Image (cartoon, grey):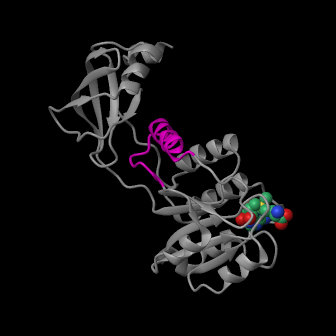
Amino acid sequence: GGTMAATGGAKTRLYVEDDLGDGRTVGLSASQAHYLKHVLRLSSGDRVVLFNGHDGEWLSSIDDIGRGWGSLEITRQLRAQSEEPDLWLFFAPIKRARLDFLVQKAVELGASRIMPVMTERTEVRRLNVERHRTNVIEATEQCERMTLPSFAEPQSLVAMLDSFPEDRTLAVCAERGDAPMLDDVLRAPEAAMQRWAILCGPEGGFTERELDALRKLPFISLASLGPRILRAETAVLSAVTCWQAALGDWRQRPPERDLA
Ligand code: SAM
């Protein structure tokens, strides 16, 4: 539309691995070059916003672009680096289309680490980690985050709990039983002093054996998401939303940027 034309495509936001700074030139990957040239139809002189997760956000302009290659010249910094909240997210993988949705939304909602865990009733056993990492990058570019969440290789629940750090609390979403409400858990006075992770189970739920094992761990806090049984992705995204509202950065607003 008109806005895109007026800003010369400057709304296009790309994650790059190169260092970013005044006077630098950045190379495009083959797929980025393809996307800019053939999908967005950008050419030399068009502007692109760049970030790499640690050097802030920069305005650049396309220097030259061809089939499968391209370079950008940095114009100026748009935003200093800032950190996203520290929230780890564990969930049992679900079927592909819903998992894609879940991962995209978890990025938008601000999770800092995304980690699939295999529980006893997890039915999806194979997962294309590279594809999910590409989805994470796309969602990060699109939602204007400043940091790239990591997407870990899947682990078994047992291995995950074995290596769980001592200085973090794991909120385990448990639909049956008498766990306190997640919102109450996260708004308790001591909650703000803790680092957090969230764990949700698969469509079949956790087994009694898993719940018994979880209850015995000192760093666990079982929590309820209310009277309805939520699908796995709804549970994960509701829990992240709850955490963001209680302890996250939702009191901040998207920054103004001058892209002209
Ligand atoms: N098959 C299970 C049952 O009928 O009891 C339901 C599992 S639910 C579809 C999938 C996961 O979402 C659960 O393992 C849990 O982590 C989470 N979940 C769903 N609804 C929830 C609720 N009301 N409170 C807490 N967690 C919930």
- Magenta stretch containing residue 97, yes or no? no
Q: Going 57% across and 86% down the picture, which residue do you hit? A: 218
**Residue 47 locus on image (x, y percent):** 32, 21
Residue 92, percent across and down? 66, 59
Q: Residue furthest front?
A: 126
Q: Position of residue 115 (x, y in %)?
A: 54, 59
Quarter of the image with the C terminus is top left
Q: Is residue 130 magenta?
A: yes
Q: Quadrant of ligand 1?
A: bottom right
In the image, what residue occupies the spot 28% across and 13% down? 44
Instruction: Answer left or right for 257 relative to 152.
Output: left
Q: What stretch of residues is rendered in magenta?
A: 128-151
Residue 71, position as x, y percentages in the image: 25, 23
143 with respect to 46 (left or right): right
Q: Nearer the viewer, residue 40 or 158?
A: 158
Tell me, yes or no, if residue 163 can be seen here.
Answer: yes
Q: Is residue 14 placed above or below 39 in the rendered structure?
A: below
In the image, residue 141 sits, relative to residue 109, either above or below, namely above
